Amino acid sequence: MLRNAETQWADDEALNDLLLRVRSALPGLDGRVGSPRPDELMLDRPQPLADLLGHWQAAHPEAGRHYWAARCWTLLVWQPIYLQVLAVQLDDQSPELEGIAQGMQQGFVAGFCLPDHQLLRADAQHLLRHAGQQIRQFCAQAHAACGALLGLHPKLAQRLAADCVMAALLHTQRTDGCGNLQLCRRADAWLDACAMRGASGLLAVQLEDGGSRLGLQRKACCQHFRRADGELCDSCPKLPLAERTRRLREQHG
């Protein structure tokens, strides 16, 4: 990205500081700065991607390819997406995702490594545009790397990624306490920046005490119900809206 008068670039310690704040906001989103380990997931490493798929095929052979694909894809994209959303909303900065390496253990993807680089600081509009571009590029590269392996339709991939963006925004609300209307506006802005308009959303529910809460309004099923121990998630689009609303209300009851 070209540097111009509207942007600033953070100092050398800013990336480490950001990763500490992100980890504090969401324990488990544990990043480090440095070089990737040989066993870490990267988009240009076919074997770890195949290993991830192989794990879930072996763990739940009954669930079938739709579940395996959705599970692996969500695991692959959740950390880069959460990192961007939390960095922008809680720290007013945006990292680069190029070269990200992700830890994988027993089929779960957690922990990541970023090359040392300078964070982008800019006004809210430019910052969001940059973060959205980073998410779009990562998801496009990820689908190019493993979409055929997983048998994952691009539309489903986009909707599952958009659900991650919305879930990350809901998490920031618990941290920064922004109002529901403001969060809905943020949600629309993020979906536009990521070129995911209409791929996910937020659902408002009136509570018995007169207040209201927001929940995830998924447009895609994560396929968890296909597992022998699975069921429809509380926010599953396969559930009638009234049932999703009831479950969300109970969560905040």
Image (spheres, rainbow, N blue to C red):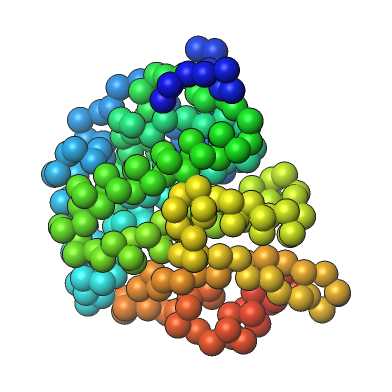
Please, is residue 18 above or below residue 202 in the view?
above
Residue at 48% of width from left, 36% of height from top? 130
Please, is residue 132 above or below residue 31 in the view?
below
Report the number of discs: 0
Residue at 47% of width from left, 43% of height from top? 132
Dividing the picture into quarters, in which one does residue 152 lie? bottom left
- Residue situated in front as seen by the camera: 175 or 55: 175
Residue at 17% of width from left, 39% of height from top? 45
Residue 71 seen anywhere in this rendered image of the structure: no
Task: Point out the image quarter for the N terminus.
Answer: top left
Image location (x, y in percent) of residue 182: 73, 54
- Residue situated in front as seen by the camera: 124 or 96: 124
Image location (x, y in percent) of residue 200: 50, 65
Could you tell whether 183 is left or right of 159 in the image?
A: right
Residue at 14% of width from left, 44% of height from top? 46
Could you tell whether 47 is left or right of 79 in the image?
A: left
Could you tell whether 46 is left or right of 24 in the image?
A: left
Task: Point out the image quarter for the C terminus.
Answer: bottom right
Residue 228 seen anywhere in this rendered image of the structure: yes
Image location (x, y in percent) of residue 249: 70, 76
- Residue situated in front as seen by the camera: 126 or 231: 126
Could you tell whether 209 is left or right of 78 in the image?
A: right
Dividing the picture into quarters, in which one does residue 63 lie? bottom left
